[in-house]
Image: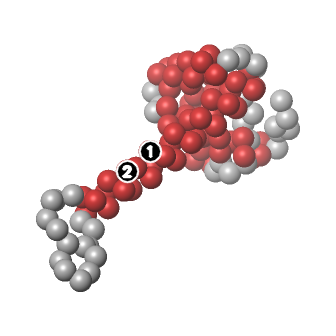
Amino acid sequence: MSGTPPPPGGPAEPTDALRDEVAHLHEAVRSQRDIGMAIGLLSARYSCSTEQAWRTMLRVSQDSNTKVRTVARILVATHDGSADAADAAVLATFVDHLPPSGWPTGPWTEEDLAP
């Protein structure tokens, strides 16, 4: 993105800045996907609108001092069973900020995850 044309006869080598930008965009897409999925999960779990689910995620994020994308990633990972012990530790910091019926804590507790 420096504005200089590639050398004749071959593709330009991506710069470090371009690689960083592409990596950042990939992370943004993953985060947006997780946020969308988490909104759907919260909406289904608590029988609320997607707007209410989004506001719940924002409140949980603020109250627990956890980034929204992290809250979303951990809720999705817990739901699909891919959460690890580190995710469980972070979940424990914000699960009390969810509505009263709570959130399943995952397979490591051997709880039934069915709503």
> What residue is drawn where x is 64% and y is 22%?
50
Choose between 87 and 11: the one closer to the eye.
Answer: 11
Give the numbered dot on residue 28. 1
Tag 1's secondary structure?
helix
Residue 23 percent coordinates (x, y): 39, 56
Tag 2's secondary structure?
helix
- Tell me the distance, in whole angstroms, between the alpha carbons under discs 1 and 2: 6 Å
Choose between 102 and 6: the one closer to the eye.
Answer: 6
Check the image and report above or below for 68 versus 24.
above
Neighbor class of circle 2 (other Cα within 10 Å; few <14, some 14-19, many 20+) is few
Question: Identity of the amino acid at label 1?
Answer: Ala
Q: For the N terminus, which image quadrant?
A: bottom left
Residue 99 percent coordinates (x, y): 68, 17
Choose between 60 and 2: the one closer to the eye.
Answer: 2
In-image side of 54 versus 45 (left or right): left
Hey, which residue is sitting farthest front in the picture?
8
> What residue is drawn where x is 46% and y is 33%?
67
Check the image and report above or below for 2 versus 100.
below
Residue 115 percent coordinates (x, y): 83, 30
Residue 39 percent coordinates (x, y): 63, 29
